Every structure is written in structure tokens, then in C-alpha cells.
Amino acid sequence: MAKSEEFITSLPEYAQKYIEVCLNHSKEVATGSGKIVNQKERHIPTIAFFLNIWLPMTMGDTIARKTYYEWLKGDCEHKSNTIKKIDDLFCSLAVDIVANEGKGIFYAKNKLGMTDKVQNDNSHNINILSLDPLDDSKDNITIKDS
């Protein structure tokens, strides 16, 4: 079923509301004294959760992930630009959470294209001894004839 122009135009607003939910999420944590407190814990926004759970529960409407990615790569500039803006917002928040809170390392590697920095230092000093097997003048072994 084709989505209305109004739905497509409203998607960035819906994405912004979802981002606010991700930013304001908190969880209950026990303190050292046993008291339960709410601790702020930002969530990494994901396309799957946004489309499959948040949009239908909150807005009562959604699109399939397949449609989302078809719009992203499609010829319709309005749809493509809308999805690109949403994707950029989600990635920006995800990068900030990963960078500042150390969460979501697998998400960062798989979705955001981040990698572990590997330092290769292949410079080694090797002393090469040049030995002539026929020249025994530098040997420390003394051979006596009997």
C-alpha cells in the first residue's frame, strides 16, 4: 500500500520524537546503600526498532524496512532525502553514544563502519652475522693436532 505524502513528510518529525525517547531513557539502578534511583542511559536509535515497534505503537502507522531502504536508494528525491536525513540523525546520535559512553561497540563496527585501530610496527633491528665457514681466524676455538 502506498504511503501518503503526509506520512512521508511527517517521518522526520516522528524520527525526532523517537530520538528524544532514546536521549531521555533511564533505568533503575541500586546504589551502594540499597536505594533504587533512576539513572539516565541513552539508547542507540535503530531503524528496526523505529519501524517495527516505536512507529506502530506511538503513531499507529509504519513502513517495512524493505520500503525504508528502497526509498533510501530510490529515484524519488523527496523520499530519498527524507530517509537520508533520518539515517544521518540516527547515526549521529549512535556515534556520540559510542564515543562518549563506550556502548554499542558491535553496533559501531557493523552499522557505523568503525574499526579497532591496529598498530603494526614491523621495523625491527636485526644484526646479521657474516660468517665464512672456511675462515677460522675469528673463531674462539683452538684445535690442536696430536
Image (cartoon, grey):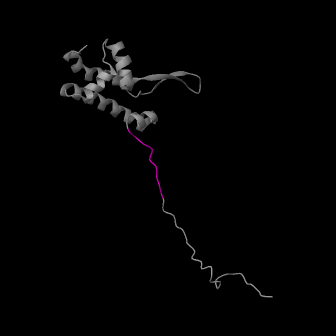
* Residue range of the region highlighted in magenta in the rendering: 113-121
- Main SS class of the magenta portion in the image: loop
Magenta span has 116? yes
Q: Quadrant of the C terminus?
A: bottom right
Residue 60, how many percent across, how many down? 32, 11
Q: Residue at x 54, y 68 (%)?
A: 126
Q: Residue furthest right?
A: 146
Residue 104, how many percent across, how many down? 45, 33
Magenta span has 108? no
Q: Residue at x 31, y 16 (%)?
A: 62
Report whether 94 appears left or right of 120: left
Front residue of 109/40: it is 109
Q: Residue furthest top?
A: 60
Report whether 76 appears left or right of 94: left
Q: Quadrant of the N terminus?
A: top left
The quadrant holding residue 2 is top left
Answer above or below: position of 112 versus 27: below
Q: Residue at x 35, y 21 (%)?
A: 50
The quadrant holding residue 24 is top left
Front residue of 95/36: it is 95
Report whether 20 appears left or right of 30: left
Residue 125, how many percent across, how many down? 52, 67
